[in-house]
Amino acid sequence: MVSVNLLPPNVRLARRRARRIRLWIGVVLTTALLATVPIGLDAAKAARAAAVDRALAPVQERLDGVRAELRQTTADCSQLTTQIARADALRAKRSWGGLLVTITHHQPDQVWLTSLASKQSTEPARARPGGKKENAKAASEDAVVALDGPRGIRLEGYALDHDWLYQFITNLKQAGLFTNVELNSAGREPMASRDVVRFVLECDW
């Protein structure tokens, strides 16, 4: 079968041009549509990310608060642990009950005590070498607590006379509890119907 196009050449040319224009318009529109798809996806992702950030903001604030409380609790726990260790070291350093029993055993009946107090060390505390962070780390890692405990005791009381006071001092020196027993002061004071000797003893170990 043979077809014959009887249209004038100029009409055929115009039709071909129209088809080409429509084709190019379709290609351009398709390209533009495809180009807008990634932009839309990026916008959707950005919107979802912003929503997630808004949802995480209060959670992050609560997390920061919990971390701050944890740091404070850890610091308090470390301080309490140090205090407990110091108290244990102080209790283990001297048998205070045994010390009182020994003093009472060597105390003449003519001597009576009115006060017994511990004597703290007068030496300044030695700082650890290094910075604050190193000191804090070393303090947390130390298993043994270095404690400047009492260096002795101070005894105050009365004696009927100086002879009984010297006897008490001699007994304390012979007891082997102290490295030095020194009479700090002694003076007569009236009590009831007679004068007694009020004394202060410094006992070091």
Image (cartoon, rainbow, N blue to C red):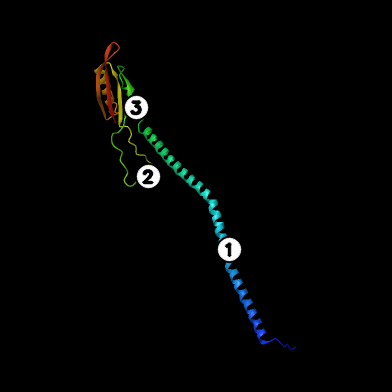
Residue 5 relative to residue 176: left or right: right
Residue 190, compared with residue 75, is above or below; it is above
Residues at marks 2 and 1 touching, judged by CB atoms closer than 8 Å: no
Q: Quadrant of residue 39?
A: bottom right
Q: Which mark is residue 99?
A: 3
In whole angstroms, how far apart are the C-alphas of marks 3 and 2? 36 Å
The secondary element bearing badge 2 is classed as: helix
Residues at marks 3 and 2 touching, judged by CB atoms closer than 8 Å: no
Which is closer to the viewer, label 2 or label 1? 1
Please name the amino acid that badge 2 sits on.
Ala
Q: Position of residue 103 (x, y in %)?
A: 32, 24
Q: Quadrant of residue 32?
A: bottom right
Residue 99, compared with residue 51, is above or below; it is above
Front residue (pair 47, 160): 47
In whole angstroms, how far apart are the C-alphas of marks 2 and 1? 55 Å
- The quadrant the N terminus occupies is bottom right
The secondary element bearing badge 3 is classed as: helix
Lower position in the chain sequence, tag 1 or tag 3: 1
- The quadrant the C terminus occupies is top left
The residue pinned by badge 1 equals 40
Front residue (pair 157, 24): 24
The residue pinned by badge 2 equals 136
Q: Quadrant of residue 164?
A: top left
